Image (cartoon, grey):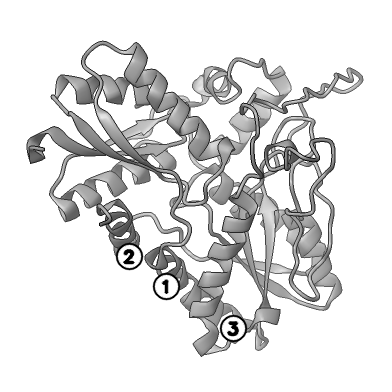
Amino acid sequence: MSASTTAVLLLAHGTPNVLSEMAPYLDKVTNGRPMPQHVVEELQHRYSQIGLRDEPLPEGPPLTRWTLRQGALLEDEILTTVYVGMRNWHPYIADTVTQMKADGITHARVLCLAPQNSRTSTGLYRKALEAALRDTPGTPFTFDFIAGWADEPLLALAFAEQLWPIWAEACAKTNTKVPVLFTAHSVPCRTIMSPASPTTTPDIGRTTKPGAPDLSPLEIGVSTTAPGQPQPVPADSIQNYGPSTAPDPYPVECKQTAAKVAELLASVGLTEKDWFFAFQSQGIAGAPWIGPTVEDTLKALAAEGHKAVVIQPIGFLCDHVEILYDIDINFRDFAQPLGLEIFRPQSLNDSPTLIHALQQVLSPKP
């Protein structure tokens, strides 16, 4: 196969460029399920707090800017053309696929920039790619789809490189060993349930570390129900993720990534009892999402007498609203009355180790 006809395609979530795009953006996220106006306005407020405006930002919104930067750095590293496609906003996967067809690409290595495999992320990205290949003009190309790469050692190393200096700073500032709280984005309970027990709320989202809070999955976030207007909860939450034939590996892979990062800091004193795990950013639908939540975990840590906590999200590869608002603003505001100071490592963004991790994952295996 000629090198000129092969390429790499990175897939990501996408984010609006200006505040007025919020409603059509949410329409993409929810697959056409309408969101109440108060939800649109609340999310506009959150995005405005991280810099989004009525006019486009010169450098673009954080998620788009950093994802395109990661693609450019990877292209320089592997000397192969790297394309970027977004599922929910520009550049759409379909538009990117159209360009790849026009460029004569015959085969692509496809990587979802969500390391932990889930029907709610990698599964939907693959469906979007297959639809784009089928529905756009031009000759379809073949592809290898990498469904998950949470076990890549360089991914854990990239997170550990960011975690170590801020953890050391937090411990020095407070003169205590500050706990580390690893987080990943929550998903609806039904998406991870075993098909053998579809009506049972699973325990898989709970923290299993000794001494950690054993909390049931809770629904938090932006309610889609206007005050005084109760609405039935859709059985499939926001979207229909398709039939489940096996338990979703996502919660297990998230905790495995966290454990690998923690292991890398064992040599500098981080022990098993010093770190915890929670799911953040529970969604805007009414159905239950997996936990424990960050909020309940912060309450438990404060009750144990801690005065600070380092929060490191290990399911996100760059800055965006779930980090810049949910952690830097919302969780800090929530923690302040509890007497907790929140520290956060820098996101991976343009981390050279992350780029090397992407290169390693994309390298053809024998």
Residue under pointer 3: 270
- Upstream in sequence: badge 2 or badge 3: 3
Residue matched to label 2: 353
Q: Which residue is mark 1?
A: 161
Q: Position of residue 187 (x, y in %)?
A: 66, 42
Circles 3 and 1: CB distance less than 8 Å?
A: no
Residue 271, x across and y down, in percent: 63, 84
Mark 2 and mark 1: Cα distance apart in space: 9 Å
* Residue positioned 15% across, 45% down in the render: 80
Discs 2, 3 touching: Cβ within 8 Å: no
Quarter of the figure with the C terminus: bottom left
Q: Residue flagged by tag 3: what amino acid is it?
A: Leu
Marked residue nearer the N-terminal end (3 or 1) = 1
Sequence-earlier tag: 2 or 1: 1
Occupied quadrant, residue 255: bottom right
Which of the pair 115/37 is nearer the observer?
A: 115
Q: Residue at point 47% right, 51% down?
A: 115
